[in-house]
Image (cartoon, rainbow, N blue to C red):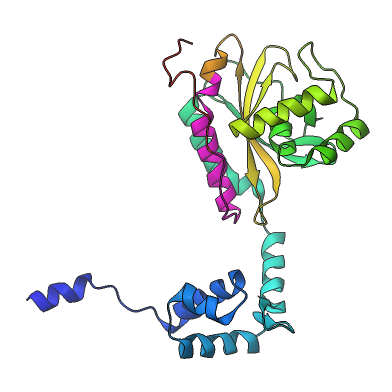
Amino acid sequence: MVEKVVAQIVPSAPSTSEKTLIVLEAALEHARFSEVVAATGFPKATVHRLISTLVDRQFVTIDAHGNYLPGPSILAMAGRALERIDISSIAQPFVDHLVDTIHCTVHMGAISGDSVIYILRKDSDKPYQMPSRVGLSVPLHTTGIGKAILATYDDETVERMLKRAGMVQLTDATITNVQDFRRELEDVRRRGTARDRGENVPGIACIAAPVHDHTGVVRYGLSISTLSIEHSDEQVEAMSGSLLASAAAISEALGYRGPHPEPAPSPLLQGATP
């Protein structure tokens, strides 16, 4: 009886197909045979046999220095998969959940040249709607999403983009000075989120977070928008935890496996009165 119970709780050994996938993943992340062996925990003979098969099928290739690299077969498969990716469809369930959690409008935007284009928008159950639409192009420097994306660039690149696009003033709150904007991005990097305090549309407050693609590059941003008269600055900041969790989930769904920004301490959580 005890032997039967033990047999039920002891996990079964991975099948050959599972081992092949484990070795493939390790070979794509590690360059040397010893590293693949250490990462998989399989015997050297097993790893050598499976690696040889993957090399024969061109899923893995070996360079002149003996390093493992992605082979033509895996690159072709990745290319076909990427062609079929619909970012909006992948992000939609996470956006829906965020809206249900914070009851505010949520946008997802993508960088396009020197602008942000909204690719997804979900309104809450509030009796008003934001003056935005999918496909709308807005200046990078006036939006939370734009700031969240630009904060991942170096200062020289940011300055070049801003000078090329021009820092148009959309509201009295719009930042139109490069040096002031650089200081703003320093704050974004520190906090992990970006703010738009009526800089794009008067009376609308926004908090945004970066979204990474499968390569780790930030090409997208996720934002929460609300009326300034409905939520105080501290209340908007308090949404950062939910926002960052959703942005991280979307990034991971897109194939990103790196670190994510942590939310800065919220004044509300420190006992401040909104």
Question: In this picture, is 236 found above or below 19?
Answer: above
Q: Main secondary structure of the magenta part?
A: helix
**In the rendered image, the vertical position of residue 165 relative to residue 248, given as above or below:** above
The residue located at (21%, 70%) in the rendering is: 9
Q: Nearer the viewer, residue 11 or 226?
A: 11
Q: Quadrant of residue 219?
A: top right
Was residue 265 drawn as part of the magenta stretch in this picture? no
Residue at position x 68%, y 59% from top? 84
Q: Nearer the viewer, residue 157 or 121?
A: 157
Q: Is residue 252 magenta?
A: yes
Placement of 250 over or under 139, stated as above or below = below
- Left or right, residue 255 beside residue 180: left
Quarter of the figure with the N terminus: bottom left
Left or right: 159, with 273 as reference point? right
Boundaries of the magenta span: 236-261
Q: Residue at x 82, y 35 (%)?
A: 115
Q: Position of residue 218 (x, y in %)?
A: 69, 45
- Which residue is at a point 57% across and 85% down the rendered structure image? 51
Left or right: residue 47 versus residue 225 is: left
